[in-house]
Amino acid sequence: MAQPTEHLAFKAALARGLVSRRGFMAGIGGLGVAGALSSCGVKGRNPGARGAAATTPVAKAAQDLSASEKVINWSNWPEYIDVDDKTQRRPSLDEFTKKFGIKVNYTEDYNDNDEFYAKVRPLLAAGNDTGRDVWCSTDWMVARLIRQGFAQRLELANIPNHKNIEDSLVTVEFDPGRLYSMPWQSGFAGIAYNPKATGGKKVESVDQLLTDPALKGRVTLLTEMRDTVGLVMLAMGKKLETFTEADYMAAIDELKKAKDAGQIKGWTGNEYTKPLASGDTAACVAWTGDVVQLQADNPSLGYVLPETGCTLWSDNFVIPAMAKHKKNAEVLINYYYEPAVMAQVVDYVNYISPVRDTKQILEKADPDIAKNPLIFPDEKTLSRAHVFRGLTSAEETKFNAAFSELTAS
């Protein structure tokens, strides 16, 4: 079990004030993930600021058409909601529409935080509707949206299930009290590999990813800076909660060496899953939920949280400025905070639930999922998880520039 100070960092992490984003992704007797994090401590993906200050800009609001237009436009990451494998429909969304009479236009067009932000920022900055009523951003991106006045404050009277947030996720650095965001799922970033492509060799360390000749040209890393650079810094013996600029740049140098040597095939968002499954990619940095899902069809796929440590993050519901169906979106968020509904989602996507009592439900409905330490982490699993510390605006600009230069083709 990690030392108390590390646990405290953990609590802040899963609470996602300070880390980056998602994938595929399993308990602690009766406590659930956040309960364990609350007692042991944890943090989340990474805000670019030190919290939502009292001077947070007020996001522009459009006339809410929820009463007359029973629709919600929701953007989310790929493979991040329950799906009926036979019909390819999304049962929880169908149940929502049946219950509330609100149609959900669900689009899987959120593949990378920065890429998505680049699409919506011009509209938000101009005070225009993005065409979306809600989406799910990683902690650090939520911090940016709040800081820039691009995220609307939630009307908690429309979200009574707000009370069901796991305690350790309520008080986060970037959104104290969860007034602008609510967590959708949390997870880890680790290493995935396809034994058929590695000749049966296990890939269990960042050093293997970056230097093993047998993997040359068949390794992909994530475009999520905090996950990729975070894993490298951990492998170098640095602490993500307290690293310096010199530590960060040293990790960039290690990644550049690997790139220049031809070790790295490319940089990906969620699109690493198919090449990994087919063997075109031998090994990669991957999100737990993605790999747990892939393993359902291909049990031979390997996944490890490096002994040197892994990153921990959350993705969060956000209602953007000028959204036309804000109340409808709040009804949707409230719906997913019903433990039985969230359990249905977690049972499929295999990420860490932010809602109380989901583990108890899955212990009866799907015991194997309830026992999976990547979905309901135990103390040993949590002891490897670390949080990428919060960045100042200047650091975020400088660090992103260095990483962007590295990942440019």
Image (cartoon, rainbow, N blue to C red):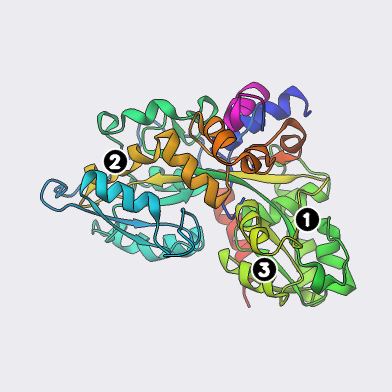
Which labelled disc corresponds to residue 406? 3
Mark 1 Cα shell of 10 Å, populated few (<14), some (14-19), many (≥20): some
Q: CA distance from mark 1 to mark 2?
A: 44 Å
Q: Residue 60: in sight, yes or no?
A: no
Q: Residue at the location (60% across, 58% down)? A: 224
| Mark 3 or mark 2: whose residue is earlier in sequence | 2
Q: Quadrant of the C terminus?
A: bottom right
Question: Marks 1 and 2: which is nearer the front?
Answer: 2
Say which residue appears at 65% left-offset and 52% top-offset: 288
Under mark 2, the amino acid is Glu
Q: Is residue 213 left or right of residue 57?
A: right
Q: Residue at horizontal 49%, vertical 29%?
A: 356
Task: Indicate the amino acid at tag 1.
Answer: Ala
Residue 382: x and y in percent read 71, 35
Closest to the observer, 296 or 398: 296
The stretch in magenta equals 29-40
SS at mark 3 in the image: helix
Q: Is residue 22 magenta?
A: no
Q: Are marks 1 and 2 in contact (CB under 8 Å)?
A: no
- Residue located farthest toward the left when viewing the structure as drawn: 68
Q: Are marks 1 and 3 in contact (CB under 8 Å)?
A: no
Cα–Cα span, label 3 and label 2: 39 Å
Quadrant in which the N terminus is drawn: top right
Q: Which mark is residue 330?
A: 2
Q: Earlier in the sequence, mark 1 or mark 3?
A: 1
Query: What is the chief secondary structure element of the magenta stretch?
Result: helix
Residue identifier under label 1: 250
Give, as a three-letter code, the residue at label 3: Leu
